[in-house]
Amino acid sequence: MKENIENLKEKINLELKEVNDLNDYMRLKVEYLGKKGKVPELADFIKTLDKSERKDAGMLLNEFKKYINNILETTRERLEEEALNQKLQDEWIDITLPGTKLNVGSTHPLTKVVDEIEELFLSMGYDVVEGPEIESDLYNFEKLNLAKDHPARDMQDSFYITAEMLLRTQTSPVQARTMDANLEKGPIRMICPGKVYRKDDDDMSHSHQFTQIEGLLVDENISVAHLKGTLEILVKKMFGDDREIRFRPSFFPFTEPSLEVDVSCFKCGGEGCSICKQTGWIEILGSGMVHPNVLRECGYDPEIYSGFAFGMGPERIAMLKYGINDIRHFYTNNMNFLENFDRQELEDTNESK
Ligand code: DAH
C-alpha cells in the first residue's frame, strides 16, 4: 500500500506539471478524489485488509489525501496566476503614449453676434420670434406697403417659387405676422433673427443667402426719440461705449420717416480711415417709424398706435467687429477660418486683461 501511494504521488506530480488549464485540472481532481477516483478506490481496498493493518493503512491514506489536496490547491493557484498574467499582458496599455487630441468646437462668429443682440433685446423685455423662410407675397411685400406694381420691389431681387410664394427677401414680413397674430392689438416688442434670400451674385460683400435681424416696437405715443434711444444702446453694446450714432433720411416703403443709421467709426474714432471710407461714419442699419398703412393692414389703428422698426445684417456687424473681409467665410465652414477666428478672439480677450 505504501509503495502504491508513493507511485501515485509520483504519477500525480508528473501529471500536474502538464496541467495548463482548468479542464485538465478538474479531470485530474476527479481522477483522484472523485467518487470512483483513486482515493476512494484505496479506501475500498483498506476495507479488505486485515484488521491489524487497517489503522496504518488508514493513516497513510489520510496523509495521501491531504497531500493530493495540497498539490491540487497549489496547481490551482498556479493556473490562476498564469491566467491573470496572461490577461495583464493581453490588456497592457502604454500609459505614456500621447492621448488622442479632442477638437473642441467654438461658437460661429455669426452666431455670436446674433446671440449678443438677442440677449440685449431680451434684457429690454423684447420677445425673440421666428417666421417662415418660405413666405407669401402678401407678407413679404403687400402688407408692408409694397403693392404688386410698387417700384421698390426692384430693390430686392427675389427667388419666387410660385406666383404667390417666394423665399423671403427680408425679415420684415415677421413684423406684419406678429401684428396680425396679436388679436388684442396691444403693444408689441419683438426682434426676429433669421435667414433671408436674394438673387445676388456671390462675392466678397454679397451672398444669395444671409441673415437679418428685424426689430419692432408698437405702442401708444412712440416717437423717433424711442427709436434713437434703443439703437444707441444697441450700437454701444456692439461697438463700444464711446460710439455715437447719426441718422440719415432714407426710404423704405414700410416706414415713414425712414432713417438710415450710421455708427461713428470704431477704428479711427471719426477722423477717417479705410474702414469708414474716410467719412468717419459706418452705415449699419435701416430703420424708421412704422408706416400708418402697415399698422392699418395689420389691424392696428394708426390714430392710437405708433411704432418703430429696424432691420440689420449681423454678417455686416460681425465683419466690422471682427475684421472679416469676405462674407462667404460665414458659410463655407472653413475650419481654418473658424479656428483662426477663435484664436484671434482669445488673443484679443487676453490683451484686454
Ligand atoms: N427690410 C429692410 C431691408 O431688407 C431692412 C429694414 C429697414 C427693416 C428699415 C426695417 C426697417 O424694419 O424699418 O433692406
Image (cartoon, rainbow, N blue to C red):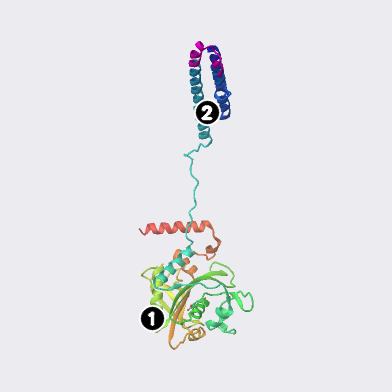
Q: Residue at x 49, y 40 (%)?
A: 97
Instruction: Count the labels in the image.
Output: 2
Nearer to us in this view, 62 or 124: 62
| Place of residue 136 in the rendered image (x, y in percent of width and height, measured from the top left) | 58, 77
Q: Is residue 127 visible in the rendered structure shown here?
A: yes
Tell me the kind of residue under disc 2: Leu
| Place of residue 324 in the rendered image (x, y in percent of width and height, measured from the top left) | 48, 64
Q: Residue at x 51, y 30 (%)?
A: 80
Q: Which residue is mark 1?
A: 225
Q: Residue at x 38, y 57 (%)?
A: 350
Where, quadrant-wise, is the N terminus in this rendering? Answer: top right
Q: Residues within 10 Å of mark 2 (few under 14, many from 20)?
A: some
4 is within the stretch colored magenta: no
Local secondary structure at mark 1? helix
Q: Is residue 271 visible in the rendered structure shown here?
A: no
> Which tag, 2 or 1, sits closer to the chain's start?
2
Tell me the kind of residue under disc 1: Ala
Task: Reply above or below: 58 against 93.
Answer: above
Magenta part of the protein: which range?
A: 44-59
Local secondary structure at mark 2? helix
How far is mark 2 from mark 1, CA to CA?
89 Å
Please give the label number shown on residue 79: 2
Of all residues, the one furthest to the bottom in this rendering is: 303
Nearer to us in this view, 351 or 118: 118
56 is within the stretch colored magenta: yes
Where, quadrant-wise, is the C terminus in this rendering? Answer: bottom left
| Place of residue 148 in the rendered image (x, y in percent of width and height, measured from the top left) | 59, 84
Nearer to us in this view, 129 or 325: 129
Q: Is mark 2 within 8 Å of ligand 1?
A: no
Helix, strand or loop: magenta stretch: helix
